[in-house]
């Protein structure tokens, strides 16, 4: 595996990128952030990615990974919620090749975060099945089995008790409904118990901004599976994308 790769994390408000040391999972130099163009069309976002690579001084031999806020199925975006509707059906790899003049490795942003936690964070060295969830406006998920990613899982959309899970248990719903930590933890208990029943994982890792306050809700959960807060937090998308790109180059 190469020792340096570049990760780009495309979000609804900003596109961020950095060089990543793949021995440590830490940034090399500063992260660069550019506002997401409006409208966030494929060509406009790809041009921002080009500016990022130029600003970071990324040479042609450095692998580049792109974390994207939608499923990526064989390089293609099947549907989109957080960017312009014109992304639906776009092959991200082909798009970036046209604009950047180089291949990239595209993957879902929750998958990137999951890989980062397994390679460098809270799940490093854990064998078996690791499920990483990000508690935010919705619930993102990644499943990694013995280091191998099962891509594009959408465990936030499991139907539990007649509800889309993230409509009850996301951090966004906790704020919207002004739930106490105790009441929210009861919803999380129902959610994680159900996921545990389906997958019998070896470890849960909980990310998202609310994981900084993990002591307010994780100790309230009663599960057979160990559950721990994420470690990489807002660097995870960039680090995971860089790691994935390096893996792809070695394949």
Image (tube, grey):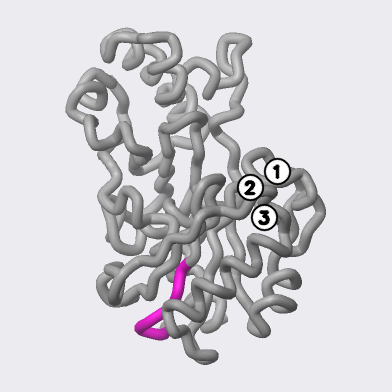
Judge whether residue 115 can be spotted in this image: yes
Which span is picked out in magenta?
A: 2-7
Q: Is residue 70 left or right of residue 137?
A: right
Q: Position of residue 230 (x, y in %)?
A: 29, 45
Please tell me which residue lies in front, 57 or 216: 57
Alpha carbons under labels 2 and 3: distance apart:
6 Å
Q: Is residue 5 magenta?
A: yes
Please tell me which residue lies in front, 178 or 245: 178
> Within 10 angstroms of label 2, few (less than 14), some, or many (20 or more) residues?
many
Which residue corresponds to mark 2? 70
Q: Name the image quarter holding residue 81.
A: top right
Alpha carbons under labels 1 and 3: distance apart:
10 Å
Q: Is residue 197 left or right of residue 183?
A: right
Lower position in the chain sequence, tag 1 or tag 3: 3
Residue at left 68%, top 61%?
44
Which residue corresponds to mark 1? 80
Tell me: residue 174, above or below residue 248. above
Tell me: residue 193, above or below residue 212. above
Which residue corresponds to mark 3? 72
Residue at left 51%, top 30%?
138
Q: Is residue 35 magenta?
A: no
- Mark 2 and mark 3 residues within 8 Å of each other at the beta carbon: yes
SS type, badge 2: loop
Q: Position of residue 149 (x, y in %)?
A: 52, 57
- Which label sits in the foreground, 1 or 3? 1
> Within 10 angstroms of label 1, few (less than 14), some, or many (20 or more) residues?
some
Main SS of the magenta part reads strand
């Amino acid at each position: 595996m190469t020792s340096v790769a570049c990760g780009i994390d495309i979000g609804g408000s900003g596109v961020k990128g950095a060089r990543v040391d793949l021995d440590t999972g830490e940034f090399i130099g500063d992260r660069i952030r550019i506002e997401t163009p409006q409208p966030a069309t494929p060509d406009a976002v790809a041009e921002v990615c080009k500016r990022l690579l130029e600003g970071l001084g990324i040479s042609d031999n450095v692998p580049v990974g792109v974390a994207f806020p939608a499923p990526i199925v064989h390089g293609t975006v099947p549907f989109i919620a957080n960017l312009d509707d014109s992304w639906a059906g776009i092959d991200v790899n082909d798009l970036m090749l046209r604009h950047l003049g180089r291949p990239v490795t595209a993957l879902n942003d929750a998958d990137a975060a999951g890989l980062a936690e397994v390679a460098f964070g809270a799940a490093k060295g854990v064998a078996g099945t690791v499920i990483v969830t990000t508690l935010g406006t919705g619930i993102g998920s990644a499943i990694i089995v013995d280091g191998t990613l099962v891509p594009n899982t959408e465990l936030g959309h499991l139907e539990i008790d007649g509800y889309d899970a993230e409509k009850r248990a996301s951090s966004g719903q906790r704020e919207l409904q002004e739930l106490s930590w105790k009441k929210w933890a009861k919803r999380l208990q129902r959610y994680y118990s159900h996921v545990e029943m389906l997958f019998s994982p070896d470890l849960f890792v909980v990310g998202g901004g609310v994981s900084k306050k993990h002591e307010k809700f994780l100790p309230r959960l009663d599960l057979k599976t160990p559950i721990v807060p994420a470690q990489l937090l807002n660097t995870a998308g960039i680090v995971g994308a860089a790691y994935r790109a390096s893996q792809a180059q070695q394949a």
